[in-house]
């Protein structure tokens, strides 16, 4: 879905971001962005429009919601590991959010499904190019419907 070489990947993402005009917006008011998750050769330029809005943000946790392409399930999968690794380096998982969400009955751990899914992973290198000093909190959904979204919203996301 993206190059495995750090230099090639950085150059590719930087090229996408360079093609996006800087928007004059209050970044403190951004509560989320929507970005595609296909291979970068197909959707990288479109994704750059979303991630350009986040450029320069610091000390944030980004909750990344993704839809499973491999399994159908009603609840959400979260990750109990400390980091995710991309060719651009390590990204910490927000352990505080993990502890909060794991107490909820609808959040479970499943490394197998997280490790084969690309919908979350492809967003992280973009964050690594536009932000410094951030954490992620990946949430994988098997069924995205209004009830699940309302539930996630009510748990504080």
Image (cartoon, rainbow, N blue to C red):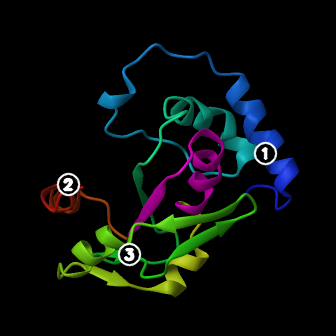
Where's residue 98, x and y in %? 32, 74
Q: Nearer the viewer, residue 13 or 97?
A: 97
Residue at which label 1 appears:
10
User: Where is the N terminus found, in terms of image quarters?
Assistant: bottom right
- Count of numbered circles on the image: 3
Q: Secondary structure at mark 1?
A: helix
Q: Is residue 113 left or right of residue 98?
A: right
Instruction: Name the mark on residue 78.
Output: 3
Q: Is residue 92 above or below residue 111?
A: above
Q: Is residue 64 left or right of residue 56?
A: left
The part of the chain drawn in magenta is 120-141
Give the quadrant of residue 51. top right
Give the quadrant of residue 144. bottom left
Give the quadrant of residue 73. bottom left
User: Where is the C terminus found, in terms of image quarters?
Assistant: bottom left
Q: Nearer the viewer, residue 54 or 69?
A: 54
Neighbours of disc 3 within 10 Å: few (<14), some (14-19), many (20+): many
Q: Indicate which disc, 3 or 1, sits on the residue closer to the N terminus.
A: 1
Where's residue 90, x and y in %? 64, 66
Q: Closer to the camera: disc 1 or disc 2?
A: 1
Where's residue 37, x and y in %? 58, 51
Query: Does the magenta portion include 27?
Result: no
Query: Does the magenta portion include 138?
Result: yes
Q: Nearer the viewer, residue 154 or 133?
A: 133
Residue at which label 2 appears:
146
Q: CA distance from mark 3 to mark 1?
A: 27 Å
Q: Secondary structure at mark 2?
A: helix
Residue drawn at (39%, 27%) of the image: 27
Q: Closer to the camera: disc 2 or disc 3?
A: 3
Q: Is residue 153 left or right of residue 99?
A: left
Residue drawn at (48%, 37%) of the image: 57
């Amino acid at each position: 879905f993206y190059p495995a070489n750090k230099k090639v990947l950085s150059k590719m993402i930087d090229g996408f971001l360079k093609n996006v005009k800087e928007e004059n917006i209050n970044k403190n008011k951004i509560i989320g962005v929507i970005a595609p998750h296909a291979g970068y050769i197909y959707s990288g330029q479109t994704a750059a429009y979303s991630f350009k809005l986040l450029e320069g943000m610091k000390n944030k946790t980004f909750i990344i919601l993704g839809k499973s392409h491999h399994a159908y399930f009603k609840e959400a999968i979260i990750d109990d590991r400390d980091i995710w690794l991309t060719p651009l380096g390590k990204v910490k998982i927000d352990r505080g959010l993990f502890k909060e969400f794991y107490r909820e009955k609808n959040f479970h751990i499943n490394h197998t499904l997280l490790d084969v899914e690309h919908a979350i992973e492809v967003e992280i290198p973009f964050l690594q190019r536009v932000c410094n000093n951030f954490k992620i909190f990946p949430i994988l959904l098997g069924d995205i419907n209004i009830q699940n979204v309302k539930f996630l919203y009510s748990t504080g996301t």
